[in-house]
Amino acid sequence: MTNFFPGINEEDKHSVLLKSISFFNLFCFLFITSIIGFTIDSYLNLTSLEEFLRIWALIILICISRYTLINFLLKAYKIPEIDIVLNKIYIITINTALFLFVINLVNSYYFVENSLFLKVSCSIVVFIYMIAQLNNYSYIVRWGNIKNIIYFILYLCAFKLAPWIWFYTNILKE
């Protein structure tokens, strides 16, 4: 947790967290996607297991397709600075999922429907998550050249925002 807000450290430059598929990475992936699913379930008050599993399967599909596409593009364009930032964001995402897990437990224990507590707590966690990511993204902007910055902007628009906007408009708005 002490490494949540700082930028890129020297130890982060030698991390290969995302380069391998391991049980730890699989567990973290399932944990993160299920926490996203449970948070959406808490907001929407889903009534059946089938609805939850459908939303969770779509979240998993979005995350797997993003992961494979980003890895393909990283191999094609060979930008080493991005690996450092992606590893750091992965660690921040795991920490954020732990916070959301605790919030979902408290919400499901004390409140019947989605509550002001859930909305305020999730908003605070997402705001802190965005600040931590912006701190890491500033590393690319400070040390990158124009070509890497343009690739980075395309990455943010196409692979970070677009799948979730599609998910919200097509699935959650129904």
Image: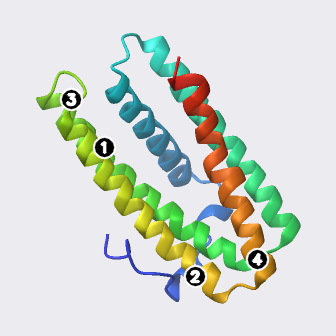
Q: Residue 17 sits in which quadrant?
A: bottom right
Q: Calculate the distance from the C-alpha at mark 4 to the C-alpha at mark 3.
A: 44 Å
Q: Amino acid at mark 2?
A: Tyr
Q: Is residue 135 above or below residue 41?
A: below
Camera-nearest residue between 47 and 161: 161
Q: Earlier in the sequence, mark 4 or mark 1?
A: 1
Q: Residue at x 42, y 13 (%)?
A: 49
Q: What residue is at 60 percent from the left and 66 percent from the top? A: 86
Q: Residue furthest left?
A: 110
Q: Amino acid at mark 3?
A: Ser
Q: Which residue is mark 1?
A: 101
Task: Tell me the distance, in whole angstroms, between the alpha carbons under discs 2 and 4.
Answer: 12 Å
From the image, tell me which residue sits under label 2: 139
Which residue carries the number 4 mark?
148
Residue mark closest to the camera, 4 vs 3: 4
How many labels sit on residues? 4
Position of 77 relative to 34 (above/below): below
How much space separates mark 3 and mark 2, taking CA atoms?
38 Å
The amino acid beneath tag 4 is: Asn
Task: Tell me which numbered mark, 3 or 2, is placed earlier along the sequence.
Answer: 3
The colour scheme used here is rainbow
Mark nearer the N terminus (4 vs 3): 3
Image position, residue 141 (x, y; %): 63, 81
**Where is residue 4 shown, x and y percent of the image?**
37, 71
Between circles 3 and 2, the one closer to the viewer is: 2
Give the CA separation, mark 1 to mark 2.
Answer: 29 Å
Image point (55%, 20%), residue name: 54
